Every structure is written in structure tokens, then in C-alpha cells.
């Protein structure tokens, strides 16, 4: 039985949460393997709407064991706030397991994230301000604090003392902020230790044993391919591995156990924060997509930048992740347009690029080469089979499939769980 990864194929907010929820009844484990509470997944089940940040969306599916993998950075206060909010709504969260090797976000890293952005001014990245970048930097710099450290106050104190020596120099001398104290930091990090303890285990072992038993594991990415620290539009990226490779390193599941990679793409493109975005629209069409698609961030509430579908980045995501199936979301948002432009290649200084340019500065100057597909006017939100779609909507799906490097297996026509057209079964 398979290990399946769900990854974002654009700049995030493609609808990964809904896709995970759609598969929830057919899987045994759902693993968050990267990122932290910078993610924002909206899941709509009947009349209920849930906004998840740190927890994997699979927590909403009864009987599924949700896992926070070793590749995640955990803000403990947010974890318990989110759990308590779900408990208050009657969701059973008792199966949650957290990797002993995941790193924790301390207050000094939240502060550093915010003050660094302010310091950068016009060169800022537009982060979510949740301390994600500084915490991953500490991990790579080998001064991070891990979940397991919380249960050994002596080790924790030693580590906090060590890390604060440098952090406090930076906080006080460069950014003119108050120093963090060892006592406060240790107190903050141990505040939830008793509640956390029963959840902590070797999640890599748990998952591999589950696969040995023939159970199904779904690995749910936060962020997306173009925000991946290696494969994204660096430096305008997040600080984790959001691609299918990251699904392995962030969970402890080896690459050869991964059977399927599902790429989630919106029928158009959005981006939150700074950085290049070739098909971005600064006109009425951009405003139209934002309004009809309700494109405002789940985490920060920021308006999302909107543009047309970009087949170059979809092909790139298909290649980098080994996408076996795409889920094309929000097709309903494109209803009512005379023509729907789709970017098929870029023009960079008079040279055509069918693939992502090697140099980031070329990508900043990429001018989309569009193909104009015919629009449709019929309401498609009630369509449940491919045949229910008007001919031009069918042609749009087929055309973007042809350009994007993998089959379109599911098409989303609305936010709710059932508003999906399954063309090929995913599991
Ligand atoms: P994620 O971060 O990838 O999980 O995506 P978000 O939840 O941040 O953003 C996707 C938004 O689109 C959410 O508000 C979903 O409820 C909504 N959504 C998902 N699929 C569809 C769809 O097919 N049509 C429409 N109209 N909305 C959708
Ligand atoms: P989901 O999982 C969209 C963006 C931020 C910023 C950059 C770095 O909902 O798709 P960070 O706080 O991670 O250091 O910010 O990455 N970003 C996202 N954009 N969706 C997300 O998550 C994002 N997570 C981070 O806006 O540009
Ligand atoms: Mg999101």
C-alpha cells in the first residue's frame, strides 16, 4: 500500500488542504513534513469551515493518525491553540503524534523574523513573520532546539544559554531590541511539556512500520515548489523543502517507498509576499480573480497577487517533484471570461524560453507568451463529472494538461469537499 505525497505546484495556496481532505477517508496517516504555522489551509466540510496552520489537514478525517514530522518547525503555543480550537468544535485530535526531532520556534526567532524584515525595507521578502526562516537557519547552523530537548531541562538550559549568547548580541546591538533571558525562554518552551509528552515519538519508525503493514500514508506539503528553498525563486522563498524530496527527508520515509506524487495547481496563479511572478496582473482581471477566487491569505489576511495559469512553472513542478497526477483547483473562478490566457513560454530579451530560465534575473524579466483559450459562461459549480463541464471548460482542462507534463486527475469546481470532478482515482 502506498506512500503518497501532495505538493503545491505553484507559489502556495493551491488548495492542498482540500485535496488532503478529499483523500482523508482512504488513508491511515497524514504527515506534515515541512514548514510550520506559515501555512494556511482552508478546508470546507458541509457548513463547517476550518483554517489550519500547523496541523496537517488530515486531522479533520476521523480515524486518520495525523503526524507532525521531523522536517517541521513547531510553535508550541500555536500547536495547542489549534488543538484546543478543534477540540472545542468536537474534532478528535487524540491520535496526533509529533516527531522528537522536529525543531521548535522560540520567541527570539519570531522577533528576529519581524525585525529582519523591517531592517530589509524594500528588499524584504514579505515573510509571514512566524519565525520560520530564523528557526530553520538555527537548525542548519546546529544551534536549534528540538522537541526532545524540552523534556530534559538541563540540556535545554545549556542549549538556550548557548544560542542566546549570539542572538542577544544581534537583538540588542543590531536591532536595538531587548535581550531574551534564559529563564523566560526555557519557561516558554517547557510550558506545554506535560501535554506534549504523550504525543512525542519516533515518527519515522511509526510511518515505516505502517507502510510495512500495508497502510496508506499521505504526506502533505506546506508551501509549494516555487517557494522551496532549493527549487523556488530564491531568495523569495520559504526556508524549507516543500517538494517531494522534502517529503522524504521531512518524514523519514525513503524515496523508493513513495508511490505517487500529486501536484496541486490552481487554474490560475497566485502569490503572497515579494518576488518575481511573470503572469501577475495589475489590472481589472487581477482584481476580478482576487474577488471571485476570494484570494486573501488564510494566515496573514494579505491580498494575494493574482495572474493567469503559467504552464512553464507547472512543467517545472512536474519535473522537480515527479508529479504523477495534478489536481486542478478553482476552475469555477474562471467562469465568465471571454478568453482565458495561459502562459506557454517566456520571452526574455527577445529569446523564447520553454523552461524556467537558469538565471533568476532572467525570470524577473520574463514576459509571458500567451495562448488565448475560449472561455465559458455556464455555472460549473454543480458539475460532478467531466462530461458535466461545458465544452470550452473541458477544452481548457485538456489544454493545460497537455502543457503541464502530467495528467489532470481531479478538477475543483468549488471550496466544499464534494465540489470535485474525479477523472482518474487518486488512490
Ligand atoms: P492551501 O494552502 O494549498 O491548502 O490552500 P488555501 O486553503 O490557502 O487556499 C485555497 C482556497 O481555495 C481555500 O479557501 C479553499 O477553500 C478554496 N478552494 C479549494 N479548491 C477550490 C475550488 O476548486 N474552487 C473554489 N472556488 N475554491 C476552492
Ligand atoms: P500554504 O501552505 C503562500 C510565503 C510568504 C513569503 C515567503 C517566506 O498555505 O500554501 P516565511 O514566513 O515562510 O519565511 O515566508 O513564503 N509563504 C506562503 N505563501 N502560502 C503559504 O503556505 C506560504 N508560506 C509562506 O508569503 O513570501
Ligand atoms: Mg494556504
Image: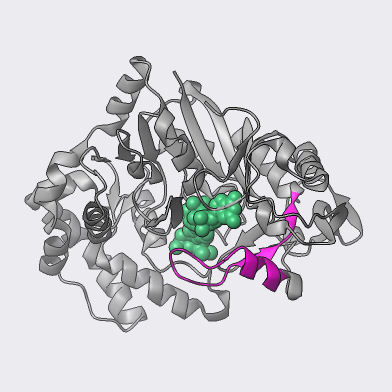
Q: Position of residue 290 (x, y in %)?
A: 63, 68
Q: Position of residue 231 (x, y in %)?
A: 60, 47
Residue 287 covered by magenta stretch = yes
> Which residue extends farthest right?
350
Q: Is residue 274 left or right of residue 47?
A: right
Looking at the image, which residue is at 34% across and 49% down? 55
Q: Where is residue 225 in the image (x, y as percent from the top left)?
A: 58, 47
Residue 254 covered by magenta stretch = no
Q: Which of 315 and 64 is in front in this view?
A: 64
Total count of labels: 0
Q: Can residue 223 be seen at all in this image of the molecule?
A: no
Q: Give the range drawn in magenta.
A: 286-310
Please identify the quarter of the rendering in which residue 394 is found: top right
Q: Position of residue 57 (x, y in %)?
A: 39, 46
Q: In this view, does 318 lie to the left or right of 296?
A: right
> Which residue extends farthest bottom?
176
> Relative to 92, is 306 above or below?
below
Q: Can residue 79 be seen at all in this image of the molecule?
A: yes
Quadrant, the N terminus: top left
Amino acid at each position: 500500500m502506498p506512500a503518497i505525497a501532495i505538493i503545491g505546484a505553484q507559489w502556495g495556496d493551491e488548495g492542498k488542504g482540500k485535496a488532503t481532505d478529499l483523500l482523508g477517508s482512504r488513508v491511515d496517516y497524514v504527515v506534515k513534513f515541512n514548514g510550520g504555522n506559515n501555512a494556511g489551509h482552508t478546508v470546507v466540510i458541509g457548513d463547517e469551515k476550518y483554517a489550519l496552520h500547523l496541523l496537517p489537514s488530515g486531522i479533520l478525517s476521523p480515524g486518520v493518525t495525523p503526524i507532525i514530522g521531523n522536517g517541521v518547525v513547531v510553535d508550541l503555543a500555536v500547536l495547542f491553540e489549534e488543538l484546543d480550537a478543534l477540540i472545542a468544535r468536537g474534532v478528535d485530535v487524540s491520535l496526533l503524534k509529533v516527531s522528537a526531532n522536529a525543531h521548535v520556534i522560540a520567541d527570539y526567532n519570531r522577533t528576529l523574523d519581524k525585525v529582519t524584515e523591517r531592517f530589509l525595507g524594500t528588499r524584504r521578502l514579505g515573510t509571514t513573520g512566524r519565525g520560520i526562516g530564523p528557526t530553520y537557519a538555527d537548525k542548519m547552523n546546529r544551534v536549534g532546539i528540538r522537541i526532545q530537548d524540552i523534556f530534559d531541562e538541563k540540556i535545554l538550559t545549556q542549549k538556550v544559554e548557548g544560542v542566546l549568547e549570539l542572538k542577544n548580541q544581534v537583538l540588542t546591538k543590531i536591532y536595538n531590541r531587548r535581550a531574551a533571558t534564559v529563564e523566560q525562554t526555557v519557561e516558554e518552551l517547557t510550558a506545554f511539556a506535560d501535554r506534549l509528552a504523550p504525543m512525542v515519538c519516533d515518527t519515522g519508525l511509526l510511518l515505516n512500520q505502517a507502510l510495512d503493514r500495508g497502510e496508506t500514508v499521505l504526506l502533505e506539503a506546506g508551501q509549494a515548489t516555487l517557494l522551496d528553498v532549493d527549487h523556488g525563486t530564491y531568495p523569495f522563498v520559504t526556508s524549507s523543502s516543500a517538494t517531494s524530496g522534502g517529503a522524504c527527508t521531512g518524514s523519514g520515509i525513503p524515496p523508493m517507498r513513495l508511490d505517487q506524487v500529486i501536484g496541486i495547481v490552481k487554474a490560475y496563479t497566485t502569490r503572497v509576499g515579494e518576488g518575481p511572478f511573470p503572469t501577475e496582473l495589475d489590472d481589472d482581471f487581477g482584481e476580478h480573480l482576487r474577488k471571485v477566487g476570494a484570494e486573501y491569505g488564510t494566515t496573514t489576511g494579505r491580498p494575494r497577487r493574482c495572474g493567469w495559469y503559467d504552464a512553464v512553472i507547472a512543467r517545472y513542478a512536474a519535473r522537480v517533484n515527479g508529479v504523477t497526477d495534478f489536481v486542478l483547483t478553482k476552475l469555477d473562478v474562471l467562469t465568465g471570461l471571454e478568453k482565458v490566457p495561459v502562459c506557454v513560454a517566456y520571452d526574455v530579451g527577445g529569446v523564447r524560453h520553454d523552461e524556467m530560465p537558469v538565471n533568476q534575473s532572467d525570470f524577473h524579466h520574463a514576459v509571458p507568451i500567451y495562448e488565448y483559450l475560449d472561455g465559458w459562461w455556464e455555472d460549473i459549480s454543480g458539475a460532478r463529472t467531466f462530461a458535466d463541464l461545458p465544452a470550452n471548460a473541458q477544452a481548457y482542462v485538456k489544454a493545460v494538461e497537455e502543457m503541464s507534463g502530467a495528467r489532470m486527475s481531479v478538477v475543483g469546481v468549488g471550496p466544499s469537499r464534494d465540489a470535485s470532478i474525479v477523472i482518474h482515482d487518486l488512490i
